[in-house]
Amino acid sequence: MLPWLILLAPLVSAALIALITGRARRLSASISVVAVLVSFICSCIVFAKSEIAGTEIPWIEFQGILRVPIGFVLDSLSRTMLVLVSGVGALIHIYSPGYMRDDPGKSRYFAALSLFMFSMLGIVLANNFVMMFIFWELVGLCSYLLIGHWFERDSAADAANKAFITNRIGDFGFMLGILMVWAATGSVIFDDIIPQTWRITSNPTFLTICVLLIFCGAVGKSAQFPLHVWLPDAMEGPTPISALIHAATMVAAGVYMLVRVGFLVQASPVALGVIAWIGTVTAVMAALIATQQDDIKRILAYSTLSQLGYMIMAVGLASDEAAMFHLFTHAFFKALLFLGAGSVLVALHHEQNIWKMGGQGRNLFLTFVTFGIGMLALIGCPPFAGFFSKDAILSLAYNRNPAIFGVALFTAFLTAFYMMRLFVVVFFGKPRSPAAKTSRESPTSMLVPLAVLALLSLFGGFHFFASHFLTLPHEREAAAFIPGIALVAMLLGAAGAIILYRRRIEDPLSINLLRHKFYFDELYRVLINATQGFLARVSGFIDRWIIDATIVRGSSGATWSFGALLRLMQVGNLQAYAFIFGLGIIWIIYFVLFR
Amino acid sequence: MIAWTIYITFAGAVAVLLLPRTFSRWIAFLATGAGFAISLSLLFCRDLDLAHFTTIVRAPWVPALGMNYHLAVDGISLTLVLVTSITAVSSVLFSWDVTERPNEFFFWLLLVVAGSFGVFLSADLFLLFVFYELVIVPKYFLIAIWGSTNKEYGAMKLTLYSFFGGALVFIGIIAAYVTGGSLDLNQLAQFQFNPQLQRWAFPVLFLGFAILAGIWPLHTWAPTGHVAAPTAGSMLLAGIVMKLGAYGGLRVAMNLFPQGLQMWSKWIAVLAVIGIVYAAAVALRQRDLKFVIGYSSVSHMGFVLLGLATANVLGVSGAVLQMFSHGVIGALLFAVAGRMIYRRTHTRDLDDLSLMELNRALPFAAFVFVIASAASMGIPGFSGFAAEITILIGVWKTYPLAVWITGAGMVLVAAFTLRALKKSFFGDSAANIRLQQGRVALDADWNEYGRITLAEKLGAGLLILATIAIGVYPKLLLDRIQPAVESMRFLKTGG
């Protein structure tokens, strides 16, 4: 029963808020927090006891053809993810009421947040492809609702649409992949597919196509190149959402899914190569863009992209352990960074431009310290969590693919550069706007989650802590100099940023290509307008002018002229009628007598 | 017992005409409500054989020609009777405010409903045809008298299309009767028609029915008809009438002529796939909200036809489930567009609506429309997803390429649905000045119509409940549909 409780508690909360407590905003918040805490506690119990099993119920059942149950998988992978998702989720739920203090749509926010927890836990628990796909789509819906929370802003509504449609494209590939697996093995349940894997692997081309299609799902959800464009725009949503959905959990679902179906992914060398390079390209591209952004949340968003790139790279280099390790540590420090950014934003009345901040180290001391810890973890400074997991991926890349290693190392340098830039510009120097001068530290309910996450970012990477949760990667063959090189890259990047940005009041660099994010949005806009507009215009034209005009009007015209022809015969002249009548009789007599 | 759905609805229609007009909406509500109660109770009735088309009533009608008044039911019929009754109840609720000639209005409405019940339950070919034609006439009056935009044109187009389809159906029925020597659907389903006959009779019959299901390129009646119809009219069109076509194609054409199906199924699949993608693309460019929904109906019905074309148990069961699903979701979308929005704003133009900030003025309507859009986009948890995924899995076995193309259609569906959602309720607030004008236009009618009424809330609630119930637990219907599909002949010969 416990797994059901984990899954359903947030759903009940979402239903309660949507149907009953919509007007009572504080109550809605409390219900949502209680629900996620229930999920978290149950997850901890499930994590501690390994023998718990969930009962499954059939969802769609066609005897002998297709069986889709709602059932749970509770291996070490999903148990770890349960604790991670519900734990980070709980911290962000606790943080949220402070951030959303005066928002009139607070109930809506918490209803969607609870629905998201339900869907995300569903992905983690799913024991079959279709169930995973169901929850996969549901997190997409929640993400849409939450990005568009402030729908009065056009930018938010557009960002929500963009996120949903981009994800749809990825999901479409994912669905085809699932269908291919089902067609080959006759099942969608992971445990039933594993013994049948040979049916897929025996045909390398089939396998490669199948894995790449499934990977499409991850490309969409984990915002990899070329479907990465939605994630930076998703920052239009409230900051806790960015922390939970667009940094710590949902975007990591793609990585989790690839690890979950590792038995297929690992079997195709070609697909692995593609996956590794997609991850690498995403990592370095996002890091490059991040160096030239001015919006604090967008910088963090690009850094998320870049780190997700690392994880996908690790999957592509055939090390699920390294990917999961980085997913694990990244969840802590990236949630921390976003919540820290949220704390800054609340203090500055939602001014997101880092050049209008400055000097916040003194005003927001606790935020400053915790943000600093998060930053050090992200750039891979020992002994913080990110150091260990990033080091694992770098060693892996060094062993498997030197070219990827080179790019990954350069990305590490860039990461240190842009994060130190952000840190220096926001927290040091003089305040550069009136709001920045008078900023005040956030309430305790927001600082506690920061502190907890800071602790986790500090210890999360150590063997004694992480090994409880994960099988840690062992790249023993890797030369001992890898951490050294990584450290040098990191120091170079950080030092460069400090030298370049100390006491600046505006950005000394201006690289248009990076400021415009490699012109991806512009390119896609042109492409979409061209194809979609063309398609719609052509079909509209066909509908109106060809089908309706020629066929329908044509046939109605034909009917009409036939009628007109008949009208000619109705002359209204009695003699004429009598004549025609007579002709008819003669014809009948002829017909009867002479034929 | 299920035959009573027909009798009660007809009785209701007569009563509406005879009794004073103040009672008419209540009579209509009671009659349709009774139908709903009956079909729902039969859904949970254990001792009903839903695997076969089981006779419930049989009386001689014109013995010389072998015509019988013969009704039967199986899982497919029951599902469609259920969706008919659900749509009927909610369309009565959404017509609660009809003040112009209410007697006649509810009379025609009940006739459509009763005729549809009749089609879904007929086991006699001629009886089925009589009920089928019976539905067309009241539709014409509903649209031509109570409709809006371009109503005469829409009504006439719909009627002409229907009669054209009816003529084709009639030819097919005559052919089956003359060669098979019977009008009994169950007997004919056992008869071996020769392949030459099947080669031409199947497409004639199937196409005749499929016109009402909005098969491309004979779908153009659907958008104009939906737009012209009054709210209840479009709900019935989307919810029920389009299902009549698909049901006829399955029950008569496919079931009688399995070899014909085999010969033609890939052409049906081609037309269905074109319809799905094409209608979605057209919807992307429409300015009238009802046109958007009308084309989305065509797109969704494309899934039904695609599922039927697979001729395997997954695809066909999914198609029947999709008929249910689209009936409920389409009705809900039209209810929001026609009743909740149009009656209050007198416009359905998306650009105008986007200036009105309707999400503030009509929060309940916004909530319903968000849910309906999500359901229409195939979000899991709503019936559309369960149906479409079943169909696509079924199609994958027969026509993998069709799934690839359909996928593009699903992206387009998301695109136009989100566009309509944003423009209609969450419009562009940057245009603050124009917004003021929009407000004024809305406020003028505010006194007249006021808030969302209880009837609207109940009607929307019923439809939402239906789509969620089936979305969460599709087995409820699939368990009843699947055995009925499995007993059909084309599965054995047509594979």
Image (cartoon, grey):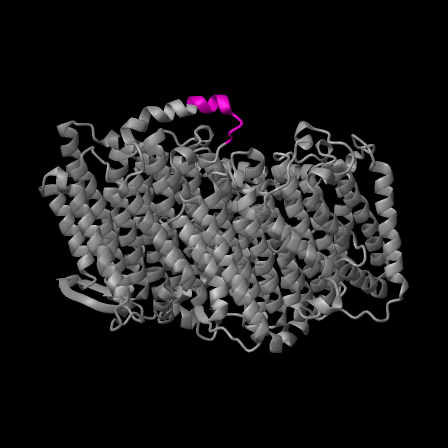
Question: Is residue B115 highlighted in magenta?
Answer: no
Question: Is residue B430 highlighted in magenta?
Answer: yes
**Front residue of this view, candidates B162 and B487:** B487
| Residue A33 x, y percent position in the rendering | 50, 54
Q: Where, by quadrant of the figure, is residue B451 drawn?
A: top left
Identified at 50% across, 24% down, the residue is: B432
**Front residue of this view, candidates A94 and B274:** A94
The kind of secondary structure the magenta stretch mainly shows is helix
Identified at 20% across, 33% down, the residue is: B99
Q: Which stretch appears magenta?
A: B428-437
Number of numbered discs on residues: 0
**Front residue of this view, candidates A178 and B360:** B360
A593, above or below B261, in the image: above
| Residue A242 x, y percent position in the rendering | 61, 47
A469, above or below A416, in the image: below
Identified at 44% across, 44% down, the residue is: A25
Q: Where, by quadrant of the figure, is residue B443 drawn?
A: top left
Identified at 34% across, 37% down, the residue is: B340
Task: Let me know if residue B9 appears in the view.
Answer: yes
| Residue A430 x, y percent position in the rendering | 76, 32
Question: For this view, does A251 lie left or right of residue A509?
Answer: left
B258, above or below A542, in the image: below
Task: Let me know if residue B299 appears in the view.
Answer: no
| Residue A42 x, y percent position in the rendering | 52, 67
